[in-house]
């Protein structure tokens, strides 16, 4: 039994962490939080140059040809430092859709440029408030042109291309590749609880749209890609939860009250212990997800929902309590606590919110993967 | 059991209602009702000027500081009358929020500790809204541990008897509008921390006083830092004896806990309304069993706080002192609001991350999400409140105190809270 | 505004508490827990003699002619000492059904004997696992004779008469009064998590059944009576929660560890503070319920569900943590902690379980009583 | 990442499986699987005799105490081999539960501290199941605070060098079957509490030893009280120096925390199966959104513990020492089991109060409800475990200790836990 990353993968983690400790400090994150830029272009370029964006993309398409385990390692590190870059949209979702369903031509056209960071992709499916289901998809494609409105679209303000769910001529749901620079595409930036990640509304008025994958198969493809992306996202959340715990622990050791470090008070000590518990459960569930991701196990849908529910819960729990442990200082703009709090709540709803994944998990378990919970 | 006024209460309520109906700035009612967290909601005019005007009007009609004696500009009303006034003033009460600390905490402290001459000079203009007061207690390195404060007051060496103040206070609301401040300082670091403190009131326009707004995690700036550099205070602005500052501060803090209302809001009514409107898979969210269970648990917290408040009002109505029940209010409301705002965002799906005017209820739940962490900390953190309930209400022993009998200067400290990531804090 | 009991009602409370402190000690409760008796007959007789059973029964029917507020006061005291007597079945349910829907003849026949404790009544509606709804009622009445099985029936092993929900000749649901001594009635005692209260399965094989209230109106009557009983039950739960909190507080003051009373440790202190919070919320919600009970306010259904949900939550919370604060000693048979834990979980499911009342509360609020939550 | 055995592990597993297949008491498999809480489930024959027989068989084939050296009757196997054995032994492991404390805690302590002669005499019969050992540590007035124990050991005044023991121990499982006991006593009350302790092993048949079963809140009796009245122990049965008892006990307790498995069960699989069968308003409970949300949160706890265990096994498989992750097991499982048992009763409606063979899963959830409070207390309460995680894993400072440097006799105590209602406890 080996439910752990390999030594090489751990070396990769150390290397990525060193890189990010220079290129993705609090100052870099705050530059995006407070500045006009949608994401940190220098950081994104740096990740591309190290071959990290293309980690799981085959070499023939300009990637590094590593496995998704390496991508899990990278995701955790990006989550730890709240990297303000569109990796999840461009890689976990867009590149994965192409790998999963794209034609050779489409792969050749886009994967190398996604891996190099030259092109940023995103995934546009939600059309407003509430859960996204096949029934909520109103965007339509006729004669190769798409019309409709998608929002919110994470990183939609910065993306060059988008994979979009829409009704095809037969009324089924298909995936389409849309060049966001084309005529008929309008985008509006949306304010959000986490300005370190871009959010936009994309409006299509018969903009050119190219079919991606089999017609009518769109929802099925999207669901499979979202399950895989959920595992990678869970690693980002795990990284954030761990970092929030470390921040709170460090502060509890250093901050004195009543002549003692506040970490010597059980009220604080036990908050931290509970943060450790939720982060530890999340890590173990994420490793289960990582195993399913690379082994192509039949229980991948259950593993994805498990990792996602566990990590969402842990990151929200740890980010919230990190502020509580910091007290008044934790509620200042100057301290980083709120950056983690914002990100934890933003990630909690992207790719579908916690209650949706809770439903997915139990639906899938009752559909026959029950044994995996034993 | 009933929710009715006594005859006297009903008469008083009618009188209040009539006056407010005739005098309140009706044109502001709408924006006042839309008020979100941390502002009184007035945007169409200067909120401070509007607040001072409303307070002046109340004072002229004898409706200012109902709980104060008349000689200081109050109305000498009973606690229950004060509650009824608050119920009737409704949204307009927010107009005079800038006076809350002055009327509720600073005034009573001055009343209890200042010389008559000072009381006659300071209190009437506070009651009438001419002067704004702020409270200068918390410091970056002493929040829950207030008595650990470090702002120094030293006798001037010019024989004037004046005191020279150096140091920093934090979380001071209204400092930028304040004429006067209630300031607690350390005058003797060589004795145990509670024994070396002295209280003053000072003119906020004094040279050496610098007010800087604090930017909060939610982007608002409802609080300030106040820096003191060689600020001079005459000795006759001292409240209580030298070294008696802790005792004086207890008067202030005791008054902080007296406020009684119809229960702090958890935000439940907003969530409930939202769940009536929102849909899950084409059905009203309120019909979803998961939503129902969540709503029910929040509903009983909301109503529990509401009727806890009414039990306290019932006691006042009988001329009794309310029990300790109200101490649960902030503890329950803060956590419930954070919990329900996260739940509301969940129901909004991916759009839950969006925070603008088009968001459900103009982004009220996103605002709650970002404001609620402060509720769980300000004016006594959840942990401090549990200590207070455990010790003062249930009679459990206090925590072990390692700093009790140690000279302040020998107590280990961490310097002002350092930040927890690579970069230095901007505060 | 006067959301409080009157001085007279408070005197009644003190009087009842004094009485119970002698007649309903831990020893009395344990006699029922460990012995063959289904309930404490001497105690029940004592309550009757003091006129407490008949508190809310009109004098013309042998009651004391007080209000339901006095009954709330009595219920709280019975809950505090875990009184092992069938008051809820016989008074909150049976007597209330008769008062609510009985004919003058039926009232004359039964109310005086219920008030005197000479007759014990119970209410039989559940027919097995899960929620009881009109659809789950299979018991049938034909020609004045009832057939079917009801279980569990609280106090069904001791009761002399039962008010039973059953299908009438028209297939509607009606209430019937059944003499449990009659032919065709079989009863089987059922083991439960709280042996201080009796539980039974009642099997009817064309036993004589007398219509109670309007034919076809049974479910409606039952629902109204159950709402009112839920408020009284909530007071019992409130009493239990308060007593569990006091036990834990007293133990935390007396038990020493590491040279200190354990109540001086924040871990214990904060558990107790949270118990106080839930018990205080429950008390305020119960007073709201009591007001609705006597004022006949339109919001009674909301108030009943509010009080019930709040008290169930509080009693389970306090009873559970009372054991935790006591540590190992709290898990011994000799300490009383488990008596409260058993009762809290038994009351949590009688009259319908927490999730059912949560659903009721929100259904009723959305049906137009929403304002009452503001 | 994979869940596969290495070649060596697979070979070992095959060997183990074959032997167990050929030798296990198959006729007991069914009742062992039905085992509920606090018993190994064997009812058709004497469970102790059956356990001893199974242990003897294992010993004769070289499968006893895999982690012990061969000279003491062990198999000198690697930790991962021990894990594999446990996985393959499956339900039959419960048969030898009576030896868990002897093999896991007492044996290693004797190995570390006893004289060679004693080791050779005591350990082989413990390994082979001839002798049962129990651990005599906890006392009524010292649970979490073990070092506060009061059982006295005094030198006999007859010059024999023997020790005379008086006092009481509690929560001793298996005492009634035990041949030997590991006993910690206070030999010097005049020094700080950790310094005045001394460890012995004693013959449980010694005069003056009285074992009384404790009736637990759930009606079972899995534990005992053990009373000592002038019990005589020869000095050569002392482990470690006089006053070194605390250090010796740490060897025992350290071994308590070493057990690693596939994660403690929260009872989730049972609840999930139940929700697949049960109905709410005519629909499967598992389709109710409230049930789903509850199940999902429990599911990730269950799987989180399962894969945390597998991460530890992975470390062992690489010859590494597992991290501290397993310290969360009991903390998570105890609370989760209590929570889910209450939820299961809720779903059963009024019938949830009924506890008999006809209850869903033969009353398993009612048994969990009544047993789970003990899980949250025994072997380290939730509060102690949070302290351990905070201090040993996260490196936070310890609680303030007022009794650290005080002579034991001067530490305030409460006498044995008094009861909390009118009547005296029956223990």
Image (tube, coloured by chain):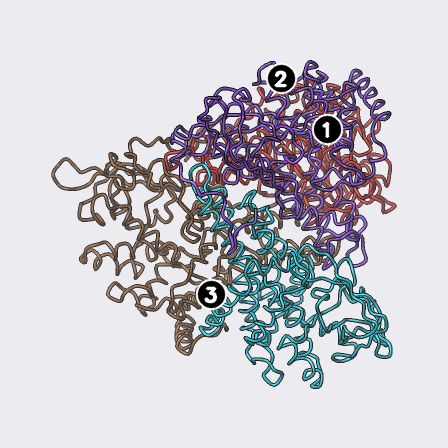
Chain colours: A red, B brown, C cyan, D purple
Cα distance between the residues tagged 1 and 2: 47 Å
From where the camera sits, is residue A175 visible?
no
Secondary structure at numbered mark 3: helix
Horizontal arrangement in the rendering, residue D187 relative to residue A52 (left or right): left
Q: Nearer the viewer, residue B159 or D149?
A: D149
Name the residue that disc number 1 marks: A290
Distance Cα–Cα, label 3 vs label 2 = 70 Å
Residue drawn 82% across the image and 33% down it: A298
Q: Is residue C126 above or below residue B424?
A: below
The residue lying toward the viewer, choosing from C4 and C7, is C7
Q: Separation of disc 1 and disc 3 at Cα?
A: 55 Å
State the residue position of label 2: D119
Image location (x, y in percent) of residue C193: 68, 54
Q: Is residue B157 above or below residue D131?
A: below
Image quadrant where residue D122 sits: top right
What's the chain of the residue with tag 3? B
Q: Are marks 1 and 3 on the same chain?
A: no
Q: Which mark is residue B383?
A: none
Nearest-to-viewer mark from 3 and 2: 2
Q: Quadrant of residue A45?
A: top right
| Rendering coords of residue D420 (x, y %) | 51, 52
Residue A215 lies left or right of residue B351; in this view the side is right
Q: Position of residue D256 (x, y in %)?
A: 61, 28
SS at badge 2: helix
Residue furthest toward the left? B159
Q: Are marks 3 and 2 on the same chain?
A: no
Q: Chain of mark 2?
A: D
Residue B321 relative to residue D144: left or right: left
Counting other residues with Cα less than 10 Å from the Cα at mark 1, is it few (<14), some (14-19), or many (20 or more)? many
Residue for badge 3:
B311
Which quadrant holds the C terminus of chain A? Answer: top right
């Amino acid at each position: 039994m080996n439910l752990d990353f390999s030594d090489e993968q751990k070396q990769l983690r150390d290397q990525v962490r060193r890189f990010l400790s220079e290129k993705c400090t609090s100052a870099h994150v705050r530059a995006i939080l407070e500045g006009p830029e949608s994401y940190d272009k220098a950081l994104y370029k740096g990740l591309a140059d190290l071959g990290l964006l293309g980690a799981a993309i085959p070499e023939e398409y300009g990637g590094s040809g590593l496995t998704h385990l390496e991508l899990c390692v990278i995701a955790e590190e990006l989550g730890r430092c709240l990297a303000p870059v569109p990796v999840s949209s461009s890689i976990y979702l867009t590149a994965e859709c192409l790998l999963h369903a794209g034609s050779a031509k489409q792969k050749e056209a886009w994967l190398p440029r996604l891996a190099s960071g030259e092109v940023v992709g995103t995934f546009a499916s939600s059309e407003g408030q509430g859960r996204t289901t096949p029934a909520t998809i109103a965007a339509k494609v006729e004669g190769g042109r798409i019309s409709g409105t998608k929002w919110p679209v994470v990183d939609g303000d910065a993306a060059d291309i988008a994979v979009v769910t829409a009704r095809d001529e037969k009324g089924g749901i298909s995936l389409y590749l849309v060049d966001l620079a084309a005529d008929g595409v309008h985008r509006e930036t949306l304010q959000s609880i986490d300005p370190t990640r871009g959010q936009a509304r994309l409006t299509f008025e018969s903009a050119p749209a190219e079919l991606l994958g089999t017609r009518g198969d769109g929802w099925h493809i999207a669901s499979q890609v979202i399950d895989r992306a959920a595992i990678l996202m869970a690693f980002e959340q795990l990284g954030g939860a761990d970092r929030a715990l470390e921040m709170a622990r460090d502060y509890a050791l250093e901050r004195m009250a009543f002549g003692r470090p506040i970490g010597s008070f059980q009220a604080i000590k036990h908050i931290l212990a509970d943060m450790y518990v939720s982060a530890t459960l999340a890590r173990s569930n994420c490793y289960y997800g990582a195993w399913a991701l690379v082994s192509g196990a039949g229980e991948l849908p259950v593993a994805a929902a498990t990792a996602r529910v566990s990590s969402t819960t842990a990151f929200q729990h740890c980010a919230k309590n990190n502020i509580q442990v910091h007290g008044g200082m934790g509620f200042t703009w100057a301290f980083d606590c709120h950056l983690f709090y914002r990100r934890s709540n933003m990630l909690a709803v992207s790719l579908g919110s916690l209650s949706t994944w809770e439903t997915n998990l139990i639906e899938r378990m009752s559909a026959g993967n029950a044994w995996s919970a034993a | 059991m009933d929710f009715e006024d006594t005859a006297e209460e009903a008469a008083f309520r009618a009188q209040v209602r009539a006056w407010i109906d005739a005098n309140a700035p009706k044109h502001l009612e709408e924006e006042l009702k839309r008020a979100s967290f941390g502002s009184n909601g007035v945007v169409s005019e200067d909120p401070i000027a509007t607040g001072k005007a409303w307070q002046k009007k109340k004072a002229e009609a004898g409706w200012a500081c109902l709980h104060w004696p008349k000689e200081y500009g109050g109305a000498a009303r009973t606690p229950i009358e004060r509650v009824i006034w608050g119920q009737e003033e409704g949204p307009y009460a927010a107009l005079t929020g800038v006076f809350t600390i002055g009327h509720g905490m600073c005034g009573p402290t001055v009343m209890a500790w200042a010389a008559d001459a000072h009381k006659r000079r300071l209190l009437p203009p506070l009651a009438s809204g001419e002067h704004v007061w702020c409270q200068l207690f918390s410091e970056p390195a002493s929040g829950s541990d207030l008595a650990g404060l470090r702002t120094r007051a030293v006798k001037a060496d010019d024989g004037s008897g004046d005191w020279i103040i150096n140091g920093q206070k934090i979380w001071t609301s209204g400092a930028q509008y304040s004429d006067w401040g209630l300031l607690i300082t350390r005058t003797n670091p060589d004795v145990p921390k509670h024994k070396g403190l002295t209280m003053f009131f000072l003119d906020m326009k004094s040279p050496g006083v610098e007010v800087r707004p604090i930017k909060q995690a939610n982007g608002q700036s409802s609080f300030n830092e106040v820096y003191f550099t060689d600020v001079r205070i005459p000795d006759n602005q001292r409240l209580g004896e030298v070294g008696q500052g802790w005792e004086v501060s207890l008067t202030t803090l005791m008054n902080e806990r007296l406020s009684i209302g119809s229960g702090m809001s958890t935000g439940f009514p907003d969530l409930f309304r939202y769940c009536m409107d929102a849909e899950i898979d084409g059905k009203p969210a309120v019909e979803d069993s998961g939503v129902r269970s969540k709503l029910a648990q929040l509903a009983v917290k909301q109503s529990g706080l509401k009727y806890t408040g009414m039990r306290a009002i019932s006691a006042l109505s009988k001329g009794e002192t309310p029990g300790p029940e109200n101490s649960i209010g902030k503890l329950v409301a803060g956590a419930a609001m954070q919990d329900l705002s996260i739940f509301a965002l969940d129901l909004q799906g991916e759009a839950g991350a969006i925070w603008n005017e088009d968001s459900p209820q103009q982004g009220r739940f996103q605002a709650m999400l970002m404001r609620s962490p402060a509720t769980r900390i300000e004016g006594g953190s959840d942990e401090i409140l549990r200590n207070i309930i455990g010790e003062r209400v249930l009679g459990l022993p206090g925590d072990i105190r390692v700093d009790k009998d140690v000279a302040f200067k020998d107590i280990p400290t961490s310097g002002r809270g350092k930040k927890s990531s690579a970069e230095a804090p901007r505060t």
